[in-house]
Amino acid sequence: MIPGPTPVPETVLRAIGRHPIGHRSSEFQGLVKRTSEQLRWLHQTTNDVLVITGSGTAAMEAGIINTLSKGDKVLCGANGKFGERWVKVAKAYGLEVTVIKEEWGKPLDPNKFKIELEADTKKEIRAVILTHSETSTGVINDLKSISEHVQLHGNALTIADCVTSLGACNVPMDEWKLDVVASGSQKGYMIPPGLSFVAMSDKAWKAYERSNLPKFYLDLGLYKSTCLKNSNPFTPAVNLYFGLEKSLSIMESEGLLNIFKRHSRHKDAVQAAMKAMKLPLFAPETHGSPSITAVAPNSINAEELRKAVLKNFDILLAGGQDHLKGKVFRIGHLGFVNDRDILMAIAAIEATLKSLTLNEAMPGIGVAAATEILA
Amino acid sequence: MIPGPTPVPETVLRAIGRHPIGHRSSEFQGLVKRTSEQLRWLHQTTNDVLVITGSGTAAMEAGIINTLSKGDKVLCGANGKFGERWVKVAKAYGLEVTVIKEEWGKPLDPNKFKIELEADTKKEIRAVILTHSETSTGVINDLKSISEHVQLHGNALTIADCVTSLGACNVPMDEWKLDVVASGSQKGYMIPPGLSFVAMSDKAWKAYERSNLPKFYLDLGLYKSTCLKNSNPFTPAVNLYFGLEKSLSIMESEGLLNIFKRHSRHKDAVQAAMKAMKLPLFAPETHGSPSITAVAPNSINAEELRKAVLKNFDILLAGGQDHLKGKVFRIGHLGFVNDRDILMAIAAIEATLKSLTLNEAMPGIGVAAATEILA
């Protein structure tokens, strides 16, 4: 129950355990062709979705360095570990970064973006970079509204880290006019880590033409031209591709709306359980990520609870990152997760809490609250 | 029988098909610790070997951009597709490149490196970049001698693409004083593509401190500091790590010397067979790669032969790349390959040749020549 690597269906694992095939073979080209179509479906886009062998960070970095040039002005939303990471990436490449900061656990304020964008009458801001679902805090940011402000600005691109939102909630790339959408395999995709994905709008490809940041392995122009030939510029992680095709087929069978509903129900159920157990949610209830719920218990060290749940029940919860270590634990409900997993995790947390703190909350109260939501 | 993805042992595939575990778990840290020790053994080095989720190109690019700065002078050996690729990478990052060129199929001339390095009395050359085993042509370059010339120069680094030499022939990093050694999982490692490896000497790490090329996902400083904690800076391809541990254990059981002998025998056997069949070797016999033999048949289109071998025998040979397409086919004998595979491939080529060209060479003559070497 961590936000990645997420659980992997048995059939996907079996596909991954196949013997690899040549990545220049016609069999593999067929696989690339089929997954390309599936990926467009998942992104709700007509753009090509490019596949990089690498982590989500590689995809996000690719989105940034393929559309921008040294000295370009960008706005970066930072309300958690990943938002802060994109600030670091942007600075590493010499971009001029204005950070739109919020405390960890609070959502980004779209209005602050609006103000900065409206004040930029010279249209110098080249991109707005932000994280949709902030995995470190369980906050979902209002990507749609922020993208609308970027549209009104006209010149800037919206570069979105959708690593833990894509395949969990609605991220209609074309409808929301997102210019770069980055994601990673070990999340909503339900496959192990190692592949990452980046889709770019026509506007982003125009920006690619003038981008002067040096790159080679992450040069998306190379991925685009080989993608058109159902191939890859560099040897890809062939076995993870086998899993990708299988998992995307499973997702197609379930359907996008059903996937989104399932994640939303699970988020609601976990929130309800934590409230019933009097465990404070770290993010505002209205801005809870569909993929992960962060909980800040005040009666117990979060790491102690997490370790006891692992020891007693062999259930891995995620800990707090950086300064949140010990203060927060996080329940992943992303990807291949069903109602049974949700109730199981809540029951295990209840039992562990009781054993550690003699918490007055009667075991069962969280499960009952979650059950009501799931019913 | 292609030079990558190479055959993968069944036990390695089974390891890869396991359910992933959390990459921040103590179980995974143990895995990183064990594989780090195994990787040092394979590289014959005391340096840390860093693991990147990406292709061999990512590892090689990382070696270049972590040790050099914009405008640095470098010598780049180019006698095939991969050597030429490193020229492109170096130029993409604004390095000042002197190309030491040889025709495809010819080995690099160490003396040309010596002359350039000796002429550089101002010691401005910062690195010599070259490919040890040139996969596109089946040529092994004399990395040892070239590295000796670099040592005499004193200031420059030796940055070596050992993607199809490491785990196939002797590449003693410390003894040869190589500064950067890059490799990839789908080669001698006997696991599917998706992981790549880069080891750096102390001298290379000193160069890292002054390197000003922008990077983040490929910033090896991040990999080094997390490696010391048995971890990774970004979510790694966990399942391929499972395979890595297993395959390196298999390699340890066989022993480095035996691995090198096996590859050398197979190279000799394939060369002898091709000569007996009157199929010209593309590389000089004395500079044949231990991993791959390129053959330039003059009586038949190489692609036609390759397709017929695939159709008739379900054996995939590699084709010629770029301008060699149709002129050359390549027999991979890299990684998990045994004597049976060698004889089988030769017999299949003989039978196919006979059916296509009514070649006067009696089927069996190549197999006989190879058998004599293998005996």
Image: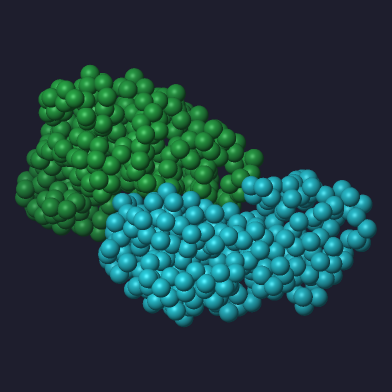
Chain colours: A green, B cyan
Residue B362: image x %, image y %? 92, 61
Residue A249 versus residue A53: which sits nearer the camera? A53
Q: How many marks?
A: 0
Q: Residue at x 36, y 69 (%)?
A: B204
Q: Residue at x 11, y 38 (%)?
A: A102
Q: Residue at x 43, y 70 (%)?
A: B120
Residue A129: image x %, image y %? 25, 35
Q: Quadrant of the C terminus of chain A?
A: top left
On the question of residue A370 being in view, the answer is: no
Q: Residue at x 19, y 40 (%)?
A: A97
Residue A190: image x %, image y %? 40, 41
Q: Is residue A90 above or below residue B164?
A: above
Q: Is residue A201 left or right of residue B336?
A: left
Rendered image quadrant of residue A260: top left
Residue B82 versus residue B57: which sits nearer the camera? B82
On the question of residue A224 being in view, the answer is: yes
Residue A358: image x %, image y %? 8, 52
